Image (tube, grey):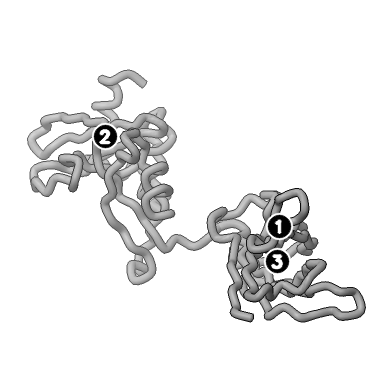
Amino acid sequence: MNVHFKWLAALALLLCAGIVQADPIKDGVLDVYKAGWYPNIYKNKQMTCPQTCRIRVGGVAEHEKSMGVKSRTTYVCKIGNGKKPLRDPRTLYGNQFDNTPTCFTTDKRGKRSRANQFHCLCITGVPCKGPDLVVNKIDRPTWDAPNHRSIIKAEIKNIGSAGAAVNYARIIDPSTNQPGGAPYNNVANTPALAAGATAIVTFYLPYWVYNPDADLEVTADYKGVVKECNEGNNSRAFHEAG
């Protein structure tokens, strides 16, 4: 898409609401969703609105599916000064197209502007539309004297809205190293979990984990077998003084 066509497309999208569809913000649920403006510059790198919203707040970029231009999606942006979006009432919201990190705007007088540094409208509180595995809790370790080992049980929960396939959970004791230098760890199979379902997994470590304190970390789907809504909430730590 060349620059001239983008300007025309931006103006058309701003003035003709009838050519867009699939607004992700549904009417009547504004008490659930939160919106805010966030700069698209992160670590001196220019980002698109989807990248900005994912990195800044773990949310999604407000967008419209376009029926009137070749671009698949236009995201809502607003040109700013690097610290905050402009509040000039003459400036309309802009469009950031697909993977092009540029905000195209047209004010009420028809003056067109473009910028590679802008703000994106980000939405948080959007429900997960796939599986999402978390470690719901870690039980206090127990001692298995006949087998000379600690037993640790953890509850894995799928808080997403779709089923999760069979995967693997792992426990690590960062306070106790094996002879080779790596921390002691153990892996347990996690069964397939429907949305909202939980499973108890059991780990074994060949010593008493209170030495003198217990410091453990359990990670759900540690191999990344399941594609989740949020890949950053899989771990949980356990600490208790001996």
Mark closer to the observer (1, 2): 1
Observer-nearest of 178 and 138: 178
- For residue 26, which quarter of the picture? bottom left
Q: Is residue 72 visible?
A: yes
What residue lies at 30% left-to-right and 50% top-to-bottom? 121
Neighbourhood count class around disc 2 (C-alpha, 10 Å): few under 14, some 14–19, many 20 upward = many
Q: Residues within 10 Å of mark 3 (few under 14, many from 20)?
A: some
Q: Which residue is mark 1?
A: 177
Q: Nearer the viewer, residue 231 or 80?
A: 231
Q: Dot 2 corresponds to which residue?
A: 103
Locate residue 44, reporting x and y percent: 31, 34
Task: Describe the element under mark 1 as helix, strand or loop.
Answer: strand
Q: Residues within 10 Å of mark 1 (few under 14, many from 20)?
A: few
- Estimate the spatial distance between the alpha carbons at disc 1 and disc 3, rounded to whole Å: 36 Å
Q: Is residue 42 left or right of residue 204?
A: left
The amino acid type of the residue labelled 1 equals Asn
Task: Examine the rendered structure and indicate whether residue 222 appears above or below residue 19.
Answer: below
Where residue 12 sits in the image (x, y, percent)?
26, 34
Q: Position of residue 57 (x, y in %)?
A: 38, 55
Farthest residue, direction right: 146
Which mark is on residue 73?
Answer: none
Residue under circle 3? 194
In the rendered structure, which disc, 1 or 2, sits on the residue that comes first in sequence? 2
Dividing the picture into quadrants, the one containing residue 10 is: top left
* Above or below for 10 versus 197: above
Q: What is the secondary structure assignment of the residue under circle 2?
A: strand
Q: Residue at x 36, y 49 (%)?
A: 62
Q: How many marks?
A: 3
Look at 26% across and 44% down and name the residue there: 119
Horizontal and vertical percent position of residue 200: 75, 73
Q: Nearer the viewer, residue 128 or 158?
A: 158
